[in-house]
Each structure stands twice: as C-alpha cells, then as structure tokens.
Image: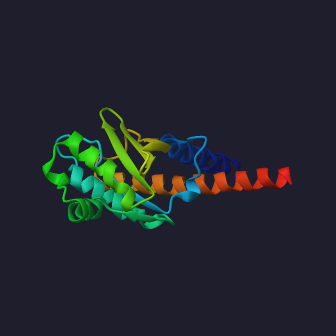
Amino acid sequence: MKKLFQIFTIACMMLLSTQLVFANADKATIIDDTNLMDVHRMAIAAPLYTPNKGEPSSEELWKTIAAASNVTRGQVVPYDTVVQNIQQDANVNILSLDRRQAAKAYRDHVAKYADAYVVTTVANDAHLVFFFDVYQAGTNKLIYSYQIVGSRADGRGLETYKVFAEQFYKNFDRSAQNQQSERDKASKKKK
C-alpha cells in the first residue's frame, strides 16, 4: 500500500510539472496615465506578420483574432468592417495601398469607429511570440501591451493563434478590472 501511494504521488508530481513546462509565458503592461475602462469598442488593425510555409495567412490571422473576441466583455470591430467603413466614409481603399500607407490611413480614420485599436505582431521564428499592442484611437498613444510566448510544443495553426488571442482579451479585461479596483481603493483611502 505504501509503495502504491509513492507511485501515485510521483505520477501526480510528474503530471503537474508537465503542465507547468507547457504553460505559455505572458506579460501585460498598462501605461501609467491611461484608463482601460474607457475602452468600450476595440478595432482590430492589420497584423504585422509574415507567415512561414504552412502557416495561416495574414487575413486568416486577423479573422481568427476577431473570432476569439467572443470571450471579451467589450465590443470588437473586425478589420474588414473598419476598412469598409473607411472606404465608404473617406473614399480611401486601404486594401489597394502599400502596408505603410494603409497603416497610416487606418490610424487616421479608426477613431470614428472605435475607442482603441489593437495591432498584433507575430514573431514566428524558433519560438512563437505574439505582441498585442493597444493604441488609443485618435491620439495613437500606446495604452496597453500584452506579450505571450508559446512553447515549442505549441502548433503554428489557427487553433493556437485563437488561444493566444483569447488569452489577450481575457487579460485585457482582467487588467481593466484590476486597474478600476485599485483606483476605487485609492479614492476610498483619500476620503
């Protein structure tokens, strides 16, 4: 019986350590003077991403990021919706412009459709690293940054990308709630 208990204990320890090894490392940063609770609508910008052979395209990536928004409390405006609205309102076809001009046109017009926009940068070398940078629409000031590093075991497909995007949305919501709680506590102490 004692031997059986020892084997069970060792098996549990190995199982838990395996989960920790495959956990993704992440880091969230809130810029000091911003209030994340002011972000009610977030637009998705074109990702900075160059797919390797066999990886999803850039269009598939932003569609996956939009689809993952079902876990957030805020409203997320997909990239193609913003592009269509800019085309209709400002008569600017972002899809026909080169990458830099398209990014500038997007930044100049996105404030009409959202409070903030997220630019996803994917570094897909030996490790898969996602950067989600949230900018305030209109001022283009960085207000929040989230980085997630995948393990070598993570695949390079849409399912992994969706999981990373869901983690971003959940962490953004959690960061906003924590920031609001801290501000509420600080205001109660001042009274």
Q: Quadrant of residue 69?
A: bottom left
Compared to residue 39, the image places residue 55 above or below, namely above
Q: Position of residue 113 (x, y in %)?
A: 37, 62
The percent position of residue 66, horizontal first and vertical second, equals 34, 61
Q: Residue at x 61, y 40 (%)?
A: 32
Q: Residue at x 43, y 67 (%)?
A: 70
Q: How is the image coloured?
A: rainbow
Q: Residue at x 72, y 51 (%)?
A: 182
Along the line of sight, the residue nearer the viewer: 25 or 49? 49
Please state, as top left, top right, bottom left or bottom right, where the C terminus lies in the image: bottom right
Q: Is residue 97 left or right of residue 13?
A: left
Q: Quadrant of residue 33?
A: top right
Front-most of residues 78 and 116? 116
The percent coordinates of residue 79 (x first, y second) are: 29, 58
User: In this image, 131 relative to 15: left or right?
Assistant: left
> Residue most toward the top?
126
Toward the viewer: 170 or 102?
Answer: 102
Whether residue 158 is visible here, answered yes or no, is: yes
Q: Nearer the viewer, residue 126 or 131?
A: 131
Horizontal side, residue 102 vs residue 148: left or right: left
On screen, residue 66 above or below 144:
below
104 relative position to 14: left or right: left
Q: Residue furthest front?
A: 90
State the residue at coordinates (56%, 41%).
31
Residue 145 showing in the rendered view: no
Q: Position of residue 10 (x, y in %)?
A: 61, 44
